[in-house]
Each structure stands twice: as C-alpha cells, then as structure tokens.
Amino acid sequence: MDLFARISAIYAQPGLAQHCLHLQDEHGFDVSLGLCALVDGLDGRAWSAGQLRELRRSGWEARAAIAGTLRAARRLAKPLGVGDAGMEALRQRILRDELQAERLAVAWLERQLGPPPAPGGADWATAWGNLRLVAGPDMPQHLLDPLRGVLDG
C-alpha cells in the first residue's frame, strides 16, 4: 500500500478528520506531512530536524502551498455554490484538484524518503517522535493526543 493510501486510511478513522482539520485551521498543523511522518515512524524510520528542514526546503512547502491554495479556493466557493449549480460544480472540480495536489505531494515525499525500513512491527515511539517533530515544540501535547487515541484504540 502506498503512503497516500496509508495516511488516507488513518485520516478516515472516526473523529480523526475533524480533529485534523481543527489542527490545520486553528494551529497551522500540516496534516499531510504529519500523517506521513507518523506512518513512516510506524515503519521504524526516525526523522531528524535537518531532514525535515531539507524536505520542506526542497519541495514539500511549495507542493503543500498548492494544495492549500486550492483548499482556500474551494472554501470560498462553498457558500457561493448554494443555489448556484455552476459554482457548486466548480467547487467539486477544485476539490478533485486539491486531492490530486495532495496525492502528488505525498508521492513526491515517498520518493524522497525511499523504501521504508524492513517491517518489524509498529514502532510507536518513533512514530510519535516524528509527529512531535512535524508539529513543532509550540504545539501543546493535548492537541496531538486524539491522534494517539484514535490510532491506539
């Protein structure tokens, strides 16, 4: 299963999508990058601060900005689509493009990371270390705890 499919399966867990949107909208959390770090950590690969900086600098930030711009356009179109079939159709096309931009960004990241380490069972400590790294030191732990609860339980 590719990285995008794996993070999508996590995102689809009950309650997680809404929580991730809250983290994204209210706290600036990069959901796609955070979930990728979590999944890669579960595979046993620890990320370093330097590696994260390089991933962001070498292409992740631009790719995430494209998806974010499409997300903003889709959100602007949402109220306009009420009672306007053409605008609603445009909003749906933007949504498809937004998801494609996210898929492309995650596929790029997967290529940068290379093959995951040999499977050896879920490495929760590494996963949470990676997530904490992406979230940054200012993100209160209680905001990340629902991710642990959904995935642990």
Image (cartoon, rainbow, N blue to C red):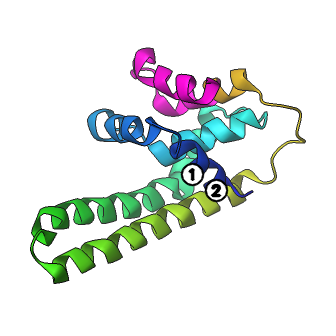
Does the CB distance between marks 2 and 1 fall below 8 Å?
A: yes
Q: Position of residue 41 (x, y in %)?
A: 70, 34
Q: Using residue 91 as the reference point, say whether residue 34 is left or right of it.
A: right
**Residue at 29% across, 41% down:** 25
Residue 5 is marked as 2
Give the quadrant of residue 10.
top right
Q: Amino acid at mark 2?
A: Ala
Query: SS of the residue at dot 1?
Result: helix
Asked whether residue 60 is drawn in magenta, I would say: no
Residue 145 visible to an observer of this rendering: yes
Q: Quadrant of the N terminus?
A: bottom right
Q: Is residue 86 above or below residue 11?
A: below
**Total marks placed:** 2
Circle 2 — which element?
Answer: helix
For the record, the magenta segment spans 129-153
Picture quarter with the C terminus: top right
Quick one: 115 or 77, which is closer to the camera? Answer: 77
- The location of residue 18, given as percent across then percent down, is 37, 39
> What's the distance in space between the residues labelled 2 and 1, CA to CA?
5 Å
Residue 132 visible to the viewer: no
Residue name at image x 65 percent, y 50 percent = 6
Q: Which residue is mark 1?
A: 8
Q: Amino acid at mark 1?
A: Ser
Q: Residue at x 58, y 40 (%)?
A: 52
- Given residues 134 and 121, the one toward you in this image is 121
| Most common secondary structure along the magenta stretch | helix
Q: Quadrant of residue 19?
A: top left
Q: Is residue 16 above or below residue 136?
A: below
